[in-house]
Image (tube, rainbow, N blue to C red):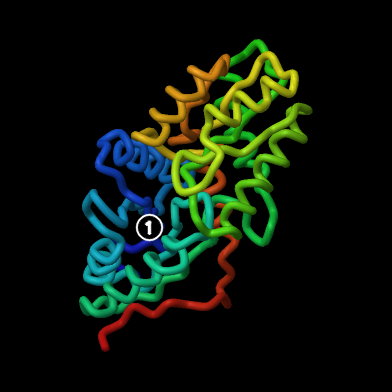
Amino acid sequence: MRPAHLTAEPPVVLVAHGSRDPRAAAATRALARAVAAARPGVPVLPSWLDHTDPGPAAVLRDLAATGHPRAVLVPLLLTAAYHRKVDVPAAVAAARQGGADIEVRVTDVLGPADGTVDSRLLAGLRRRLAEAEPGGVDGVVLAAAGTRDPRARGSVGRVAAALGAELGVPCRVSYASAAPPGAGVAVSRLRAAGARRVAVAAYFLAPGLFHDAVRSTAERAGAVAVAEPLTDLPELADLVLRRVDAVPVGSPVCRASPS
């Protein structure tokens, strides 16, 4: 008989990047609550790669210690860059080294998977834009954190193209770090091309210094509005669960077990 504290579906472990800004951790916890509310009876546990405890390895060890034979780990990342390729597998390996005996299935990131931009992601971006500027716009800048990985930047470009197509306006990419252009430059370029009401869509999961900087530079460049990060929107919680449900039983497994 299954112990009372174990569920038929495996626990879901959310793994965020982590930030020194406490608002970021609060947003991750809020998203965990939203996902749990959408999937009653399934434990949904937040974790962070850096700056905030617990880390994913500690969460996996705790789940193994309480008898859970498996878990699904969801990287709360918008691109499949370094953190997804290196840090997430390293966290599973660290759980193994710590003695955890648990099967871990890792989902795709929340950004484009196999080149496809999920409709829930676009719906969340559109909702935040409408909240920030309900009067409509004739140009949009998709502001992302930034990465040196060209494939990851390509995925951000696909989101911008899909968002622009849905809105029927030009949509350009900007980055808060690691790659040009910055948000202010992107806003200025759209305005120079004839757009008069340019808004910024925040391709961020949580608030923090990057989003603050985007807001400041975009507003100085003449943006009429800067959207809030996605945080715990229902669309984002639904997207997390889509990623969980998309991991088939026969998919590759990271076995975190004692060496």
- Number of numbered discs on residues: 1
Quick one: label 1, few (<14), some, or many (20+) residues within 10 Å? many
Q: Residue at x 37, y 57 (%)?
A: 13
Q: Is 98 displayed left or right of 213 in the figure?
A: left
Q: Nearer the viewer, residue 40 or 191?
A: 191
Q: Nearer the viewer, residue 193 or 199?
A: 193
Q: Is 246 displayed left or right of 17 in the figure?
A: right
Mark 1: amino acid: Val
* Up/down of 107 relative to 38, above or below: below
Q: Give x and y (percent) for residue 41.
A: 40, 51
* Up/down of 125 relative to 68, above or below: above
Q: Nearer the viewer, residue 118 or 59?
A: 118
Q: Which residue is mark 1?
A: 13
Q: Residue at x 55, y 56 (%)?
A: 243
Q: Residue furthest top?
A: 135
Q: Is residue 196 visible?
A: yes
